[in-house]
Image: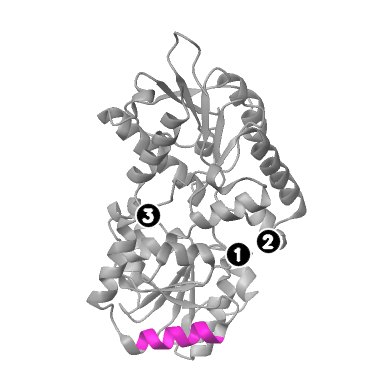
Amino acid sequence: MSSQRGLPLKIFINGRFLSQSMTGVQRYAAEMVKAVDQLLASGEVPRELLGAEWQLLVSPDAKFFLDLQRIEVRKIGRRTGHAWDQIDLARASANGRLISLANSGPVLHNDHVVVIHDAQVFRKPEFFHWTYLAAHRTLGYLLARKATIATVSQFSRRELASVLRLPPALVPVFANSAEHFAAIVPEFGIIDRLGLTPFRFFLSVGSMNKNKNISLAIEAAKRLKRPEVPLVVVGGDNSKVFRGGSKGADNGVILTGRLTDAEIAALYAGAMAFVFPSLYEGFGVPPLEAMIFGCPVIASTADAVRETCADAAAYFNPLDAEELSQRMLERLAAGRISEEERRKQAERIAAFSWRKSAQALLQFFGETTS
């Protein structure tokens, strides 16, 4: 893995994520690129990467742009989507190293690191349409044969190593983080607009994708029979949950639809607890977001979630609505977050940062460059 003799090393970053909706994977890619750029600007790079040329290659349909100091941004090709990945990007990056941060990239590139965030398409096929499943499983297998697979947690390392038949030691981990949320100024007006009383509501944030398991949180809230302390559900397709039924607080649930990050931050800051019922995650960012605002976390026992939250959360079986309902009752009895709980949260928040992950990425590139 080296540059051509006498020529500077070229490192390309797959910028296709800038043409996609800004969900968790795309946010990870954006924050990692910004953190790498900051390290490059300050000169904090391994000796092997000194003098390297960095370029972020973006597709013609890019929706977002990043303000970068050291990484050059280049719009290349005429295609979009997977065709851009496999043809235009592959050609433009052929004479250098390539890093893809958002689950996919060209399968024929000879010096490629691709971050695959989880093994859901292999472990939980029931969550996906068969066409998506077939395409992404095939892509994963092909990338594993040609590229270096990286991921975001020790759990995902084990999972991907198992399903892709790779030695775990050869799967580097560049962890996720939630620290970007700390810069968001909460928009507390959302609490009044939703008719909520501070610290008298539970909060859940997530899509209606099967792995997010929001329906179980809704069932647990109904079992509480405490409409004066409702569960607020942010995001997702409401109709799939209630099928035309009530969307008010009379059944203990308030469905808000999508909200801004500032509004979500306010709900984190004002909630009795954050409920995270996910069945499967590669990391589990929302609980960390909640901890930034001092919100107690009630989380599922999914392996990656336990890895992320450690002893800073109360846990429940994500298949047991009654157990979740019991955790919620316990939180009501305990009241506001304690100093000890806040200390544990601070430890978990400090364990993950974009800077640390970018440093790990640069170290890996330095160690594998000759």
- Circle nearer the N terminus (2, 3): 2
Percent position of residue 176, x then y? 43, 51
- Is residue 188 at least partly visible in the picture? no
Near-viewer residue (315 or 209)? 315
In the picture, the disc for residue 211 is 1
Is tag 3's residue or tag 1's residue first in the polypeptide sequence? 3
Nearer to me, 207 or 238: 207
- Find residue 178 and name its label: 3
Q: Circle 2 is placed at which residue position?
A: 127
191 vs 98, left or right, is left
Segment tinted magenta in the rendering: 322-332
Q: Magenta segment, principal secondary structure?
A: helix
Picture quadrant where residue 211 is located: bottom right
The reply to whether dot 2 and dot 1 touch (C-beta < 8 Å) is yes
Q: Distance from label 2 to label 1 (Cα)?
A: 7 Å
At x 33%, y 25%, the residue is 47
Label 2 and label 3: CA atoms lie apart by: 25 Å
Residues packed near mark 3 inside 10 Å, few (<14), some (14 to 19) or many (20 plus): many
User: Residue 312's x, y, as percent?
Assistant: 36, 71
| Amino acid marked by disc 2 | Phe
Q: Tell me: 101 left or right of 296.
A: right
Q: Which mark is residue 86?
A: none
How much space separates mark 3 and mark 1, taking CA atoms?
Answer: 20 Å
The front one of 32 and 45 is: 45
Query: Which residue type carries mark 1?
Result: Asn
Residue found 55% across the figure and 54% down from its top: 156
Determine the secondary structure under disc 1. Answer: helix
Please tell me in which quadrant of the rendered image residue 328 appears.
bottom left
